[in-house]
Image: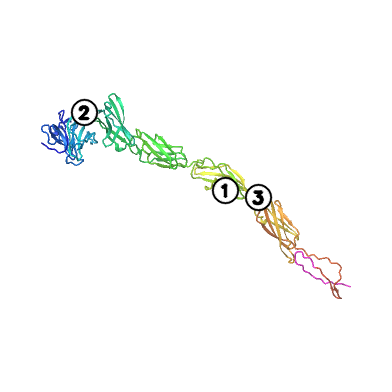
């Protein structure tokens, strides 16, 4: 007799008696049933037969042959595995077994897990398990396994100790050739293919009517599970359970099966393959082939990809680097012309590839950055007008405009003008527009006063130029220039001077008058009093000569001539002229008595002569008188 303390035992009874068909009653060595112990576990299952003699341990079930695991004196988490032979079934069948848990009242000696290992795949997750509490009776479990030839499967019994005293046991493993009584079977489930990030929906058809005690879920061999989303009736004997694997990634790829728990067992479907495809993404950016003002011609350059094919659709995504413009265009060739773009604008262009199924469009590939060319301006500046006129400058203003007119971010705005005056015509072009000004305006400086101007503005970029309408304006008057000094001519006489001149070379307006100031500055006769020899004469603008009378002979006069317009007098021109010298004049003598008379002399009184521009020199002559 073998004595046990507190332990877990499993008893399996061979029902059909043929070797290696999965049945085993454990009355003979378990290896004769094709059962094997696990190699990578911590413990072995023990085969016990109490049918002839009971154990002294009250926890060991009497009158049975079974397999068990003793949990007494075991650490928590130690495992023991028992494998059935590979089972290849062609038709509906049901596997039943019985289990037994023993230990202290209310205790839990460990976990009993059942795995269904399909083909040579990993064990995956348990399809059924129990952890007690400990009891004193055998309980039957149904396994409705829907794996059929050419596939095969193994049932794996796993005992996991809890660290408490007791035992786990199984017995009487029987493979029945009909469906389970209280646990439904599944029809064959198909694999599902989705793109990463999408939800994969599995449809599992259950052979049987829905019962409230059923618990269905989807189980992945890699560990991921999904609850049932919904059910729908298929007919009066079947219903369909639907399961979603949401937010799928490549790591979710693998095999999934449906599980249904009833009060008496578990139904297990075959594995369906979940294939997660990665939407394709181009490795390289598109290539630029040609550039225009409103188009970019690109080569998709999308032959090399990360992700999965086949490629069923191509699109070009483009957006402005600065701004919010975005567009997506379908493409049916390896090259594509993106049209209706804005000139002189930088775009970011990517290629999107799509494979079959929902969510098959990958992320945009590496972007190409490209800038369109400038286009000719739409028109020249409009509403050009003069807002201020001065003698030497004119201020212009025009209608504001922006990029929609310039069609280029780099442009120049210039003022072109022609001036006509004095029989000459001169053309100039100057840069314009102060960006700091609140209004679009420009002041033309260094102009000639009282000059006719023809003005227009030019809007120019790299691709062309547009002109504004031409306007005409005359600068304001200014003070005139000086009378040409070489034009002043003086005709001199003893007591007058005739002065002639020409108008200033630069009149800067209409000459309204001339002002001539004169003043005697010197004389050949030093005794002359010149203080009263000054004056001012004003002549009309059309008069260019003046006669100055009452002058002293032999005297030098300074003349200052200034021309005037409505704006005032210009700078003076100064010249000098000297009157001619005349013979002195003698005063008249009356018959007067000599002051003194002798025999040889006569003394008379002489009156001084009047000088005429020079000192008087007296010459005396001796008079000879005859008697």
> Do the numbered discs 2 and 3 sit on residues whose CB atoms are within 8 Å?
no
69 relative position to 304: left or right: left
Screen quadrant of the C terminus: bottom right
Cα separation between marks 3 and 1: 21 Å
Q: Is the C-beta separation of discs 1 and 2 under 8 Å?
A: no
Residue at the top extreme of this rendering? 236
Query: Which numbered disc, 2 or 3, marks the residue closer to the eye?
Result: 2
Question: Where's residue 246, x and y in %?
Answer: 32, 35
- The residue that disc 2 covers is 94
Examine the structure image and report whether residue 613 is included in the region drawn in magenta. yes
Query: What secondary structure is found at the residue carrying circle 3?
Result: loop
Which secondary structure class fits the magenta region best? loop
Q: Position of residue 611 (x, y in %)?
A: 77, 65
Q: Is residue 555 visible?
A: yes
Quadrant in the rendering for residue 618: bottom right
Residue 40 in sight from this viewpoint: no
For disc 3, the neighbor class at 10 Å (few under 14, some 14 to 19, many from 20) is: many
Say which residue label 1 marks: 443
Which sits in the foreground, 392 or 44? 44
Residue most toward the bottom?
599
- How is the model colour-coded? rainbow
According to the picture, the residue beneath numbered tag 3 turns out to be 509
Q: Which residues are magenta?
A: 608-627
Q: Count every numbered label the image shows and give the total.
A: 3
- For marks 1 and 2, the one nearer the N-term is 2
Mark 3 or 1: the one toward you: 1
């Amino acid at each position: 007799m073998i004595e046990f303390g507190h332990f877990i035992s499993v008893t399996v009874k061979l029902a059909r008696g043929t070797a290696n068909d999965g049945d085993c009653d454990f009355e003979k060595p378990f290896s004769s049933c094709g059962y094997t112990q696990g190699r990578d576990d911590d413990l072995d299952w023990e085969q016990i037969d109490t049918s002839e003699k009971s154990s002294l341990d009250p926890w060991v079930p009497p009158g049975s042959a079974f397999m068990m695991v003793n949990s007494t004196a075991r650490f928590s988490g130690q495992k023991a595995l028992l494998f059935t032979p590979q089972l290849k079934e062609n038709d509906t069948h049901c596997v039943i077994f019985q289990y037994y848990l023993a230990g202290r009242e209310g205790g839990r000696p460990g976990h009993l897990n059942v795995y269904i290992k399909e083909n040579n795949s990993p064990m995956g997750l348990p399809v059924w398990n129990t952890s007690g509490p400990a009891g004193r009776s055998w309980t039957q479990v149904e396994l409705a396994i829907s794996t059929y030839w050419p596939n095969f499967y193994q049932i794996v019994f796993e005992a996991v100790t809890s660290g408490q005293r007791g035992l786990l046991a199984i017995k009487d493993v029987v493979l029945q050739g009909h469906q389970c009584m209280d646990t439904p079977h599944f029809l064959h489930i198909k694999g599902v293919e989705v793109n990463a990030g999408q939800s994969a929906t599995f449809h599992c058809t259950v052979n049987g009517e829905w019962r409230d005690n059923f618990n269905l879920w989807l189980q992945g061999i890699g560990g991921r599970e999904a609850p049932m989303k919904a059910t729908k009736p298929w007919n009066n004997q079947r219903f369909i359970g639907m399961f979603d694997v949401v937010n799928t990634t490549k790591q979710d790829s693998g095999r999934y099966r449906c599980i249904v728990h009833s009060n008496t067992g578990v139904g297990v479907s075959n594995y369906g393959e979940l294939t997660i495809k990665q939407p394709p993404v181009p490795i390289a950016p598109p290539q630029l082939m040609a550039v225009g003002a409103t188009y970019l011609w690109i080569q998709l350059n999308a032959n090399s990809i990360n992700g999965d094919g086949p490629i069923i659709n191509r699109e070009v995504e483009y957006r402005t680097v600065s701004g919010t413009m975005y567009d997506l265009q379908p493409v049916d060739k390896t090259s594509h012309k993106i049209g209706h773009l804005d000139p002189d604008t930088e775009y970011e262009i990517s290629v999107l590839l799509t494979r079959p199924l929902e969510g098959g469009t990958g992320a945009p590939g590496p972007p190409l950055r490209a800038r369109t060319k400038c286009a000719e301006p739409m028109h020249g500046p409009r509403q050009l007008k003069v807002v201020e006129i001065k003698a030497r400058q004119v201020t212009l203003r025009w209608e504001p405009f922006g990029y929609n007119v310039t069609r280029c971010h780099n442009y120049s705005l210039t003022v072109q003008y022609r001036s006509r005056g004095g029989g000459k015509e001169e053309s100039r072009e100057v840069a314009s527009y102060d960006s700091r000004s609140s209004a679009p305006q420009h002041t033309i400086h260094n102009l000639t006063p009282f000059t006719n101007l023809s003005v227009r503005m030019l809007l120019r970029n790299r691709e062309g130029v547009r002109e504004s309408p031409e306007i005409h304006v005359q600068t304001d008057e200014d003070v005139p220039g000086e009378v040409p000094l070489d034009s002043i001519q003086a005709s001199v006489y003893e007591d007058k001077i005739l002065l002639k001149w020409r108008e200033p070379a630069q009149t800067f307006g209409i000459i309204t008058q001339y002002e001539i100031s004169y003043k005697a500055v010197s004389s050949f006769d030093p005794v002359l009093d010149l203080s009263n020899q000054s004056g001012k004469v004003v002549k009309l603008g059309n008069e260019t000569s003046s006669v100055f009378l009452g002058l002293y002979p032999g005297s030098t006069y300074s003349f200052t001539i200034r021309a005037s317009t409505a704006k005032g007098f210009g700078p003076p021109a100064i010249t000098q002229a000297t009157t001619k010298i005349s013979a002195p004049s003698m005063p008249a003598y009356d018959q007067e008595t000599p002051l003194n008379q002798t025999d040889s002399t006569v003394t008379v009184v002489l009156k001084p002569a009047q000088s005429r521009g020079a000192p008087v020199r007296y010459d005396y002559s001796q008079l000879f008188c005859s008697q």
